[in-house]
Amino acid sequence: MCSNGLNDMTVLEQLKCAEHRARLAEAALARAQEDLQKMKQFAQDFVMNVDVRSSSSSNAIADLQEDEDGVYFSSYGHYGIHAEMLKDKVRTESYRDFIYQNPHIFKDKVVLDVGCGTGILSMFAAKAGAKTVIGVDQSEIIYQAMDIIRSNKLENIITLVKGRIEEVDLPLEKVDVIISEWMGYFLLFESMLDSVIYAKDKYLAGGGSVYPDICTISLVAVGDMNKHADKLLFWEDVYGFDMSCMKKAVIPEAVVEVLDPNTLISTATVIKRIDCNTASTSDLEFSSAFTLTITTSTKCTAVAGYFDIFFEKDCHNKVLFSTGPWCTKTHWKQTVFLLEKPIPVEAGTCMGVVPGTCGITL
């Protein structure tokens, strides 16, 4: 009797999984058919010389365009940026190692991949034993991702949904795990953390987890007179013309570049720690008092920012990576904030009489 009961439960579970996958496939097919019909109508009107600017089909096509975040999402529709991210071994191998070395987190679980791109994280999760993986992305790359999923025979586990996580209707109420590669320059610039937080609040089941779970932002002082001259003094004599007024415009702009570790002149200090499992969108706007302990007597020409990422919660094998200037370079590089005038500093002292304040508003 006990054996038959187990068999019945196994069959029931398999039927539930099959029904769940069917619902996901139905929803995806309906969305694809709707989009296809809109595009076909637009093409027909165009060929028949209908004024598509005012036609209903033009309005339908407008419905397919990205909203005010279109520039951000369209940039991720270009293949080059995905190649760059996939070739970033620090980034991709850290996610792979976290997932493959902690299969207990994914075994028989429902996983949501926010901003799935080419689907690499979704496929890692599927290979680690996830029961169902839902990948969501607004950019056009998701159509290539669908082909990638089929090419790797994972379509019975992974379902992809095109759209913003805040706007799509997922055919499930809760997920066990949320994974996402949401980080932007200096962690939060053009990042998707607000979307991950939305997904967490709406879809994450009790006891579920978001990965990566811990992120920190750090600052370090830079002393590089040559780079400072290249960025600012350059404007004082441009082919014989004084363009010094440009300095005021250049200074507020952060510079994204790979720093020479030999130009670092202080210890680093953490100005923000984010726990993605408890964070709210209000945590993304903050000010932080900080001091930088100088290690070299010279002139400080800039302050640089970078971030560290940690996979820790419930992990048997913890994984971390850093985008700091001492570490293997990543596509995020470092973010440099130039000082208008270099500040003389002495080793062993703290830069400034009072702690500085770093404020970030997105």
Image (tube, rainbow, N blue to C red):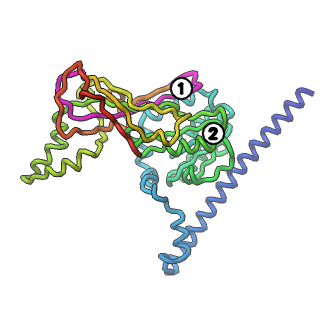
Quarter of the figure with residue 8: top right
Looking at the image, which residue is at 63% across and 39% down? 204
Task: Give the residue at the far top of this rendering.
Answer: 348
Q: Secondary structure at mark 2?
A: strand
Judge the density around disc 2: few (<14), some (14-19), many (≥20) Cα neighbours within 10 Å. Answer: many
Is there CB contact under 8 Å for labels 1 and 2?
Answer: no
Check disc 2 and give the amino acid type: Leu
Task: Give the residue at the far front of this rendering.
Answer: 354
Is 246 above or below relative to 310?
A: below
Stretch of the chain drawn in magenta: 294-318
Question: Is tag 1's residue or tag 2's residue first in the polypeptide sequence?
Answer: 2
Q: How many marks?
A: 2
In the rendered image, residue 333, in percent from the top left (x then y), is placed at 34, 36
Q: Nearer the viewer, residue 186 or 257?
A: 186
Instruction: Classify the position of the N terminus by image quarter.
Output: top right
Residue 265's disc number: none
In the rendered image, residue 175, in percent from the top left (x then y), is placed at 65, 40
Is residue 348 found left or right of 36 in the rendered image?
A: left
- The residue at which mark 1 appears reads as 312
Looking at the image, which residue is at 21% across and 48% down? 248
- The residue at which mark 2 appears reads as 204
Residue 204, magenta (yes or no): no
Q: Nearer the viewer, residue 220 or 104?
A: 220
Q: Is residue 147 visible?
A: no
